[in-house]
């Protein structure tokens, strides 16, 4: 799983974390269709496990290949740490010959944190949730800093939970160079490119969860992102891929 798949898997299962599940513990299994790398026009399918645990004081939930915790007991405000593993980019798993010839990006650990507000709007069945998160690569090939700002709208309707979330991500120079830069004399044949810091993308995701019974529920998420600025201008994207990025996921969870 590459860096982009990590981010999208996290989004698929966590972007709507203000849902108040009746169960204290849930485990789930799903599948996600995502681009092979950030900027790819080719897709791959990955298994996407998930879990969550909560009590009266804290909650912990899966965030792709990692963890995210809410250390506050307030339903109006969530905040806590993020820990995840980034699997990097491996040419052997990429169909595009030019990108697969680029140097591999080693996996590594990312650390960060988030804060999210949850406002009831139009009654207590609809919630508006602005959120900001910061994640920093601290080990291996996980380099750079990502700052994400987003706002979500969630609607509880009988056995259905429906939502949408708009987001934008700022990436610093280290992240951009690692993921979108092309060195001189690269065996890929792509033109040299020096990617600088800036707004990396804007996106929109849609979410639906159906409660089958007291234990089981099924969840679907679809998302669309547009890469911007140096991310879009990089030949990794403009020549060998696409600045329009999409993903679809579906999963089932069991609560107890």
Image (cartoon, rainbow, N blue to C red):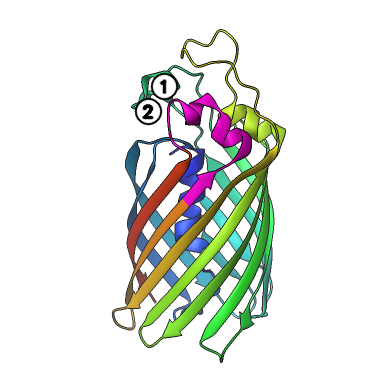
Mark 2 in CB contact with mark 1 (< 8 angstroms): yes
In the image, the segment drawn in magenta is 225-242
- Residue, x 35% and y 84% (percent of image)? 159
The span from disc 2 to disc 1 (Cα, nearest Å) is 6 Å
Please name the residue that numbered disc 1 is placed on: 100
Q: Residue 241, how many percent across, how many down? A: 43, 31
Disc 1, SS = helix
- Residue, x 33% and y 27% (percent of image)? 95
In magenta segment, residue 236: yes
- Residue, x 39% and y 59% (percent of image)? 222
The answer to whether 143 is drawn above or below residue 199 in the figure is above
Q: Is residue 115 left or right of residue 225?
A: right
Marks 2 and 1, the one that precedes in the sequence: 2
Q: Residue 240, how many percent across, how many down? A: 43, 26
The answer to whether 87 is drawn above or below residue 183 in the figure is below
Quadrant in which the C terminus appears: bottom left
- Residue, x 60% and y 11% (percent of image)? 184
- Residue 100 image-quadrant placement: top left
């Amino acid at each position: 799983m590459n860096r982009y798949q990590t981010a999208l898997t996290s989004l698929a299962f966590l972007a709507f974390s203000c849902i108040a599940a009746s169960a204290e513990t849930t485990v789930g299994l799903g599948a996600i269709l995502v681009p092979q790398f950030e900027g790819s026009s080719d897709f791959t399918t990955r298994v996407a496990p998930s879990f969550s645990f909560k009590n009266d004081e804290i909650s912990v939930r899966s965030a792709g290949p990692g963890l995210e915790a809410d250390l506050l007991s307030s339903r109006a405000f969530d905040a806590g740490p993020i820990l995840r593993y980034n699997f990097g980019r491996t040419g052997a798993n990429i169909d595009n010959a030019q990108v697969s010839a680029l140097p591999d990006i080693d996996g590594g650990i990312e650390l960060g944190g988030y804060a999210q507000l949850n406002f009831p709007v139009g009654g207590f069945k609809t919630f508006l949730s602005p959120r900001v998160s910061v994640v920093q690569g601290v080990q291996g090939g996980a380099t750079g800093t990502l700052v994400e700002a987003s706002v979500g709208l969630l609607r509880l309707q009988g056995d259905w939970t429906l939502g949408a979330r708009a987001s934008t991500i700022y990436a610093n120079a280290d992240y951009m160079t690692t993921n979108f830069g092309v060195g001189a004399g690269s065996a890929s044949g792509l033109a040299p490119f020096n990617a600088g810091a800036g707004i990396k993308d804007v996106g929109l995701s849609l979410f639906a969860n159906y409660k089958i019974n007291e234990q089981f529920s099924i969840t679907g998420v679809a998302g669309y992102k547009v890469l911007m600025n140096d991310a879009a201008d990089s030949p990794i994207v403009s020549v060998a891929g696409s600045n329009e990025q999409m993903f679809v996921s579906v999963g089932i969870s069991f609560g107890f």
